[in-house]
Amino acid sequence: MKYLILGNGPAGVVAAETLRRNDPVGEIVMVGSEGLPPYSRMAIPYFLEGNIGEPGMYLRKTADHFAQLRITERNGRAVGLDTAARVVRYADGTSESYDKLLIATGSRPVNPPIPGLDRPQVQNCWTMTDARAIAELTKPGSRVLQLGAGFIGCIIMEALAARGVDLTIVEMGDRMVPRMMTEKAGGMIKKWVEEKGIRVRTSAGVKSIDDGDADAPLKVTLSTGEVLPCDVVIVAAGVAPNLDFLAGTPITMGRGIRVDNGMRTSVEGVYAAGDVAEGCDFFTGEPLVSAIQPNAADQARVAAVNMAGGDALLPGVLPVNVLATLGLISTSFGQWWGMEGGDNVEHVDTERSRYVSLQFKDDVLIGATSVGMTQHVGVLRGLIQTRTPLGRWKDFLMENPTRFPEAYLGCQQSASAHLA
């Protein structure tokens, strides 16, 4: 049996190792497209901060790790797939056959159609090559404009701040991290960031990037009309799954590759995991891409077990986001935005930068958002993931949502008493 894994990020690595545990003799080939050892994009900020070197970004620390597991590493960029012949074509003109295929090709940055985006002082922050370029371009005092204040953008922002740059953040949404935070929570994060000396422009976009003058190499014009002199522009406007090479195949796709709870695609023998996989939402069953590393690892394990003949399932994709922003911890779990007809409650303490929002369906917690709450916040995820009926504890939380640890313990004790 030959297993071919397209992608050597976290999903590809976890899948390859899981396959070897489940099939000691099968041939495993893992393909990366950057000509580098498998590394974590989430470690790029630590590299930019100077806390680690490039080897610190590698997912496995010994050079012969995959060789010891008899996992073959290959460099190549897939440009085509023949599912009938079970053959992948690469950009260098070569091809490779497979018996079982895992597509874990990850995402790529999305660049808005902005004039001047092709200038050398304009960079994405997604690959190790990008990180090297940013490290070269940004020095203490460099005037940097970052486009995007989503989850990835906030992580990059923290790394840039650590480099001592003069930083301006521009976000098209009406708040920071708009796809992760409620309006009040996103506004609270903005206030925190501004108090740390970073300028934030929300409800604004970049209209153009033009040549500057002796004062600055770039002049960036915002949609608001403001013109900012800049040395460097970082684009963190979101990502999209790497799906182009699947054009013309019978694989069903939406925003990503549609998979069932066993990570199987619509084509026999083909699986998907990570940023490219569009699974079923934990609550609604609707298709959902959740581009976070823990989700990628979970999906990869399930896919690998099933590729090796097992029967593993995920109960659904549960959005889980944990973000540290200049010392302020924020989280969102599940359907943090709530549901039509559902109850909700929030607690706002602006002075202490503390916030919690809870969303319910009947007496089940389906979503939560928190800011500045670092202790026991994981129990919110536990209540959501277990679909725990809260009973009288729902009324307790509606009165004071910050006391969710007590509600969790109360539910656990009630369940234990019932079993006894």
Image (spheres, rainbow, N blue to C red):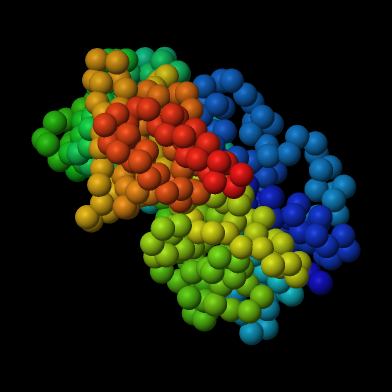
Q: Is residue 216 left or right of residue 242?
A: left
In depth, the one of 54 and 260 nearer the eye is 260
> Residue at the spot x=45%, y=71% of the render?
253
- Can you tell which quarter of the image residue 193 is in? top left
In depth, the one of 264 and 233 nearer the eye is 264
Q: Is residue 380 left or right of residue 261?
A: left
Q: Is residue 304 left or right of residue 211?
A: right
> Residue at the spot x=88%, y=63% of the render?
25
Quadrant, the N terminus: bottom right
> Which residue lies most toward the left here?
225
- Can you tell which quarter of the image residue 373 is in? top left
In the rendered image, residue 235, in percent from the top left (x then y), is placed at 36, 40
In depth, the one of 255 and 350 nearer the eye is 350
Q: Is residue 201 visible?
A: yes
In depth, the one of 164 and 238 nearer the eye is 238
> Residue at the spot x=64%, y=34% of the render?
57
Q: Is residue 144 left or right of residue 313?
A: left
Say above or below: 309 vs 134.
below
Say above or below: 385 vs 220.
below
Looking at the rendered structure, the number of numbered marks drawn on it comes to: 0
Quadrant, the C terminus: top right
In the rendered image, residue 274, in percent from the top left (x then y), is placed at 55, 55
In the rendered image, residue 137, in percent from the top left (x then y), is placed at 44, 27
Q: Is residue 158 visible?
A: no
In the rendered image, residue 14, in percent from the top left (x then y), is placed at 69, 50
> Residue at the spot x=25%, y=21% of the render?
349
